[in-house]
Amino acid sequence: MGILSWIIFGLIAGAIAKLIMPGKDPGGWIVTILLGIAGAFIGGFIGRALGLLDETTSFWSPADWIFAILGGLLILFIWKKLIAPKI
């Protein structure tokens, strides 16, 4: 998938990650969805590094969705534990 696809993917994955991640998020929905976009990029990078994703996987590939959502959860977790308490 291209960059634009990962941004759109990240918006959706960020919203899903927000629903999965318990607790209040400092910064609200906009920051959370932006973190979801970053998470989709991170998840895509990790999936490609592990050899589980490649450029030919489709937008609706379950593996892409899983890695994007897991990446979003990872970034949200880091945000809540390391960055948000200092704000």
Image: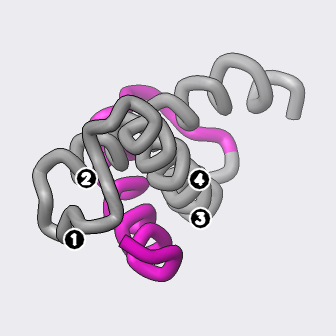
Whether residue 20 appears in magenta in the rendering, the answer is yes
Q: Residues within 10 Å of mark 3 (few under 14, many from 20)?
A: few
Span highlighted in magenta in the image? 1-26
Mark 1 vs 3: CB contact within 8 A: no
- The residues tagged by marks 1 and 2 sit, at their Cα atoms, a distance apart of 7 Å
Whichever of callouts 1 and 2 sits on the residue coming sooner in the sequence is 1
Whichever of callouts 1 and 3 sits on the residue coming sooner in the sequence is 3
In the image shown, does 84 or 35 lie closer to the viewer?
Answer: 35
Whichever of callouts 3 and 4 sits on the residue coming sooner in the sequence is 3
Mark 3 vs 2: CB contact within 8 A: no
Q: In the drawing, does residue 75 fall left or right of residue 54? A: right
- The residues tagged by marks 2 and 4 sit, at their Cα atoms, a distance apart of 14 Å
Q: Nearer the viewer, mark 2 or mark 4?
A: 2
Horizontal and vertical percent position of residue 23 = 45, 28
Residue furthest bottom as drawn: 4
The N terminus, quarter of image: bottom left
In the image shown, does 27 or 40 lie closer to the viewer?
Answer: 40
Q: Amino acid at mark 4?
A: Ala
Question: Where residue 30 is drawn, which disc sits there?
Answer: 3
| Helix, strand or loop at mark 4 | helix
Residue 17 quadrant: top left
Indicate whether 85 appears above or below 29: above
Question: Where residue 38 is drawn, which disc sits there?
Answer: 4
Q: Amino acid at mark 2?
A: Asp
Q: Residue at x 11, y 51 (%)?
A: 62
Whichever of callouts 2 and 4 sits on the residue coming sooner in the sequence is 4
Mark 1 vs 2: CB contact within 8 A: yes
